[in-house]
Amino acid sequence: MTSRPGFVLEVDRSTPPTLMWHGEGFRLERLPVGSRVVYPPEPVETLADPDAAIAEALEHPLGDSPPLRALLKPGMRLTIAFDDISLPLPPMRRPDNRQRVIEAVLDLAAEAGVDDVVLIAALALHRRMTEAELRHALGDRIYDSFAPCGRLTQHDAEDPGNLVYLGQTDAGEDVELNRRAATSDLVVYVNINLVPMDGGHKSVATGLASYRSLRHHHNVRTMVHSRSFMDQHRSELHSSNWRMGRYLAAQGVKVFQIETTLNNDPFPASSAFLQRREWEWTLKDRAGFLAASKALARAPERLARSLLQSINAPHAMASVQAGEVEAVHAATTEHMYRQLLVEVEGQADILTMGLPYLCPYNVNSVMNPVLVMCLGLGYFFNLYRGQPLVRRGGVLILSHPTPWAFHPVHHPSYIDFFEQVLSETTDPLEMEAKHEETFATDPWYIHLYRTSYAYHGVHPFYMWYWGAHALDHLGGVIVVGGDRRAVRRLGFKPASTLADALEMAEDIVGPDPSLTHFHAPPLLMADVR
Amino acid sequence: MRALLVERSLPRFATARLASALVPGAGGGVRPLRLVDMDPPELPGPAWRRVRPRLAGICGSDLATLDGRSSRWFEPIVSFPFVPGHEVVGDVEAALPERPVGEGGRLAPDRPGPEGGPTRVVIEPVLSCATRGIDPPCPACSEGRTGSCERISFGELRPGLQTGYCVDTGGGWSVEMVAHLSQLHAVPAGFSDEEAVMVEPTACAVHAALAAQVQEGETVAVLGAGTLGLGVVAALRHFDLPGKLLASAKYPEQRALAAELGADVVAGAGEVVRAVRRVTRSLAVAPGGPGPRAPRLAGGADVVVDCVGSAQSLAEALAVVRPRGRVVLAGMPGPVKVDLAPLWQREVTLQGAYTYGTEERGGLRARTFELAFELVRSARLGRLVSAGYPLERYGEAIAHAASAGRRGAVKIVFTPQEEAPRPAPRRPAPRRPAATRLPPGPATSRRPPSSPRRSR
């Protein structure tokens, strides 16, 4: 059975209210007649036998790569790097794609007599994963076999002894990589693609790199020139990563890439209404919506957060590709586009979106205001191909409570960024010039990144840069139902209701504006013509 | 004459304390303070002059007194009933002596005002040996450190650490007071009354800033951005060479002023610890969260100047000063409960900074007031005067002063020569006039700001 593609609805008088995520809750909003709502495609078909598909991919790799079996030799140094906690969203039910793939790779390595195997969580500058998170991603068998003997590690971008400087690309970009990976005979990278941005050379060149390397593509100029960073061929972020990846290959770092995609099925059956179009809601969906929204609204904030963070998505593997990095990623990207793209005709004056409780950087954590900005203006705004859903000078309206709340262990530098940097400036270029270096080299942040579960000191800057293209493009940002102080600190305008926000937006874009609503998650990518 | 008088009344102080705990400044309403018609104070001796206050500031110490929050430490060095007001610019009618008087080389004004009129003066309120007729003066006064006078309740005057706390001198919250020649500083031409009334609190700020003995390149944190805190920021920037100057400020107007006056980093309420940590690149022994759940620092600022004097600010000062750093307590404290473990464990020096006297910097000696005049002019501190009230509206004035930061104000003053009009009998009660908004910038008029009522 094929799934239904994405869909653009034009709102008329008979259109039921539209569901909007609102952090740890939802809202039903009536959009003005004539508005368009972009719905995601339904979950795509999954692999009937993922393990067989993985074995098949490893035996018949893409590009000019030999089968993995042929690359494994006794006495070799094998490093298996894998995506960290930021993927997938929400975390998937066990077994995770990483577990399935790595077990298959380890079986082959064992058959080939490879003893020197090390697993590395490719954190880049993200927080370290907890034991529970690692067990969830890799399975108990792998964890118990590798962790106790120190062969399951997490990349430390601040450990000079575990980094190796390999030189510069033709564009003058420093390439500094995890020493174990750089000195291995083979790096197998195991990836989960949720959006087209992930994977390809970005996996190793970002996931196993240091700040010295990352700063060449995680910066304002790059992000403003990535239109969008979800579209590899128009993304300066990817161009830089590709240069670095090719440079790594030229320096002898051999990478065997394994990429998997999911079927875009993020919510369990009990929350089916979240994935169904409103006019198709059954009585059960309505009851589910009422029960969930009332319960979440009445639950204390921490409880609501904890309930939602405990969701394990029924995602299932939809494809697996292995072999040479670029060939693999080209195939993955095709899968992603087939799964996510929705054709949309033309741009709107106003783009609305409801932001959920989760983004890549607050798994088991708090969605702080900086991450709200990153999710709205970074991830969701950039989920387009061609041109943004909203015109230049248009208005983005977000729905999110935007609480002035931070996870003190995960996001210590975010607190300072929010309290001190954003109180001075919201201009990405200014903060990059004036503050980034200080945060990036702050010894306390480095200490917490290395020894606790903290994102790197520079990470909140990257999150802000993620939204730099949107900040450059938009005429205004309004947050509905957000903490007014926090919203203002972000440089945005608070509004109590969507109606208020639309009225405020008209002051910027003029009367009778066109409006498009981005109905996600489940995720979609707008192919704007 | 009209004057605001504080009387010793334990029930009133207790009520004021209770009321102010509920609403800051409410102590002014239930008051040990009241408006009275009284005789002007007698001249205690030939070296004393009558002064007619033009503007008289409301200080944090005044508010603490009226709210019943003052320490009982002051009881033996205050005499009741007293007229408050020690931040005073006023007019001296009589010609002043030809010779310099006073301690430490300070020159009192020795000329009459223009065309033989009154001379505008600022009062240095500390009641030192000279004012008390004590000769020879105590060692501190001999050295010009009048703020440390050891004869503070002796001599020809009744007890009173300053003008404004002594029965015999009166205070600025009245139509007339007396001051010793050694207390008088002529106001230079071109100084507005608003600038002049800021000289005394600025002198306190200068003294606190210099007491910190900041070495070049040191990081200094100033807690509080009221009149004193802003003055300390300005003084540190003007007279010292801190490497980084961080100020904490609760309200947007305070934040803007702190930055304008020279703070490199301005942290909001509850953000100080994190800001100091970031500026000093200190480690922290516990991560903490936003706001009050701040991290515990391993290092910290070299110097912290506490311009608040509360238990909370003192605890914050001890939390953000580095081991072997210095905390200067400039804000007037009352009885506070503070955990001194960090002071002990980190060998922190805690130093008080009270009033002023003579400052020594780089081998040069200067009266603090001279430096304060210089700073008021260069930093344009007259702009900190936000509103003026006639004595009759003292309740509103005190409430305004107590909530100055929240209301976007800094210094609230009385305009004692201005008399609020009385409502005419048998007519509808007139709308209460707004507080006199003092003109911004360096106004040069010597007239007290006119009341809105009068200008109708």
Image (cartoon, coloured by chain):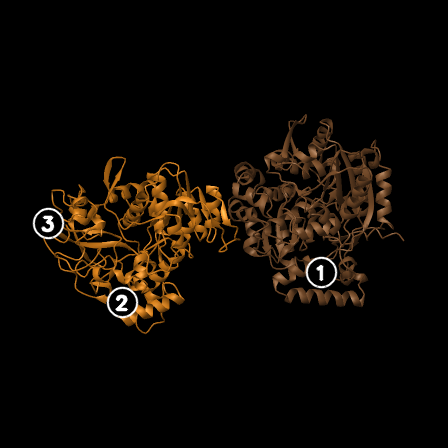
Chain colours: A brown, B orange
Residue receiving disc 1: A30
First reached walking from the N terminus: tag 2 or tag 3: 2
Q: Is residue A428 above or below residue A488?
A: above
Lateral position of residue B318 relative to residue B196, left or right: right
Please give the label number shown on residue B34. Answer: 2
* Structural distance between the alpha carbons of marks 1 and 3: 86 Å
Residue at mark 1: chain: A
Looking at the image, which residue sits at the far right? A1
Foreground of the two, A336 or B299: B299
Foreground of the two, A136 or B170: A136
Closer to viewer: mark 1 or mark 3: 3
Identify the secondary structure beneath mark 2.
strand
Residue at mark 3: chain: B
Image marks 2 and 1: residues in contact by CB distance under 8 Å: no
Q: Looking at the picture, how far across and down is residue B339, in whole percent? A: 39, 57
Q: Looking at the picture, how far across and down is residue B302, in whole percent? A: 39, 43
Q: Label 1 sits on what residue type? A: Arg
Closer to viewer: mark 2 or mark 3: 3
Q: Answer few, some or many: residues within 10 Å of disc 3's Cα (few below 14, many 20 plus, some between 14 and 19).
A: few
Residue receiving disc 3: B135
**Image quadrant assignment for residue B210:** top left
Q: Label 3 sits on what residue type? A: Asp
Closer to viewer: mark 2 or mark 1: 2
Q: Do the residues at discs 2 and 1 belong to one chain? A: no
Q: Label 2 sits on what residue type? A: Arg
Please give the label number shown on residue B22. Answer: none
